[in-house]
Amino acid sequence: MAQDENPQPSKPTGKRQRAGAQPVTSSSYQAKAEPARAANKSDEKPGGGVTSFLPEVVEEIRKVIWPTARQMVIYTVVVFAFLIFMTALVWGVDFLTGLGVEAVLGN
């Protein structure tokens, strides 16, 4: 049999090595977190305050991808079909449970 020029193992042989990875210590974490904390403290009102709320809402609404009329009809039909199915399922379980209780506790 001919062997491959570059054979690959059929399954992983061990953990991947992270080149140059340093262990995280509390002091190194604190050193990295300090500049971020200083930047956040410079903001007087995180989030922009009440006056910027409505413009931000309008900006986010413009980003929404609205469904087409056909998609809305399909989604509505799927929701109604699911509701009908679940209603029938709950009714069936309730009815069968009632029959079972009548059979056990009845005269």
Image (tube, rainbow, N blue to C red):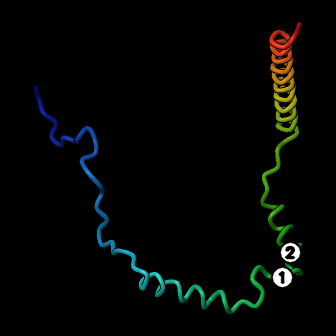
Q: Which residue is mark 1?
A: 49
Give coordinates of residue 99: x percent, y percent.
84, 12
Depth check, front residue: 54 or 99:
99
Identified at 82% across, 61% down, the residue is 62
Depth check, front residue: 14 or 102:
102
Q: Is residue 95 left or right of residue 42?
A: right
Give coordinates of residue 38: x percent, y percent.
60, 91
Give coordinates of residue 44: x percent, y percent.
76, 91
Check disc 2 and report its element: helix, strand or loop: helix
Q: Is residue 44 left or right of residue 84?
A: left
Q: Quadrant of the N terminus?
A: top left
Identified at 22% across, 41% down, the residue is 9
Identified at 88% across, 80% down, the residue is 50
Depth check, front residue: 33 or 7:
33
Q: Which residue is mark 2?
A: 53
Establish if 26 lies above or below 5.
below
Q: CA distance from mark 1 to mark 2?
A: 7 Å
* Category of crowding for the residue at label 2, using alpha-carbon neighbours closer than 10 angstroms: few (below 14), some (14–19), many (at least 20): few
Q: Residue furthest top?
A: 107
Q: Amino acid at mark 1?
A: Gly
Residues at marks 1 and 2 touching, judged by CB atoms closer than 8 Å: yes
Residue 79, quarter of the rendered image:
top right
Q: Residue furthest front?
A: 107
Establish if 41 lies above or below 97.
below
Give coordinates of residue 37: x percent, y percent.
60, 87
Establish if 92 lies above or below 64.
above
